[in-house]
Amino acid sequence: MARVKPKSKSKPKSQVQEYLEALVSAGLLTLFLQAFFVQAFRIPSESMLDTLLVGDFLFVNKLEYGPRIPFTHFRLPGYRKPHPGDVIVFDWPPDPSKQFIKRCVAVGGETVEIRRKNLWVDGRERNFPQAHHVDPSEHPEGSDPRDNYRAPTVPPGCLFMMGDNRDNSLDSRFWGPVDMGLVQGHAMFIYFSTSGDQWWNGLFNIRFDRMFRPIH
């Protein structure tokens, strides 16, 4: 009669090993979600005042326009295209390692002009209620494109982006349209906001009235 070899018992995992596996799994899941669904973003400048304040933390919807494959400019299909008025996070064209947030004011095929601070698209004035000016002076045409500017037609697959704080925004007036390959996603809502300029005093300067505010 043949002897049955007893099954070897698997060595139980240590608590440290279980913790490490859980951390790795959580990290991979976070990277997956950030790459294809939602990304967190912090407002570093005043170019989108008063819509967004320095110290606002917001979520960016990557699925809406189609998530971009990491380390490429190729994106999967989204369920809609960007529209004028959308607040969008994108890689800055002169240096894609930096991310900017601005409002889309025109899309491919439209012609943009700035006449004495006012935005005109395809020969018609296009106003956004969030846009405002803080400097009453006007930069003459030819000095810089802030207040007087005529752009060629926005190329297909590109967006013309401007900050709501029109007199204090480095945007497409200065470095041109943004290719859709650089777009990260559509800003959804503010999940946290603080006026503290350092992490250790940020928790004592929370702007509770701005938390969970949708971005328009």
Image (cartoon, rainbow, N blue to C red):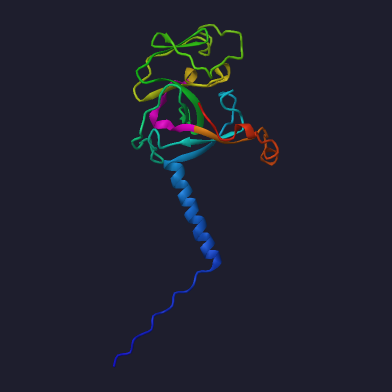
| 7 sits to left or right of 129 | left
Give the image location of residue 90, x and y in percent: 46, 31
Number of marks drawn: 0
| 51 sits to left or right of 37 | right
Please determine whether, in this image, residue 89 is positioned above or below residue 115.
Answer: below
> Which of these two is toward me, 11 or 193?
193
| 80 sits to left or right of 85 | left
Give the image location of residue 124, x and y in percent: 41, 9
In the picture, the quarter occupied by the N terminus is: bottom left
Q: Is residue 53 magenta?
A: no
Question: What residue is shown at x 50% (from left), y 13% (from top)?
Answer: 145
Q: Quadrant of residue 151?
A: top left
Q: Is residue 186 magenta?
A: yes
Question: What residue is shown at x 36% (from left), y 30% (from top)?
Answer: 80
Please determine whether, in this image, residue 182 is positioned above or below residue 168.
Answer: below
Q: Magenta residues?
A: 175-187
Question: What residue is shown at x 49% (from left), y 53% (from top)?
Answer: 26
> Which of these two is toward me, 17 or 143?
17
Give the image location of residue 178, x and y in percent: 42, 25
> Which of these two is toward me, 183 or 85?
85
Q: Quadrant of residue 5?
A: bottom left
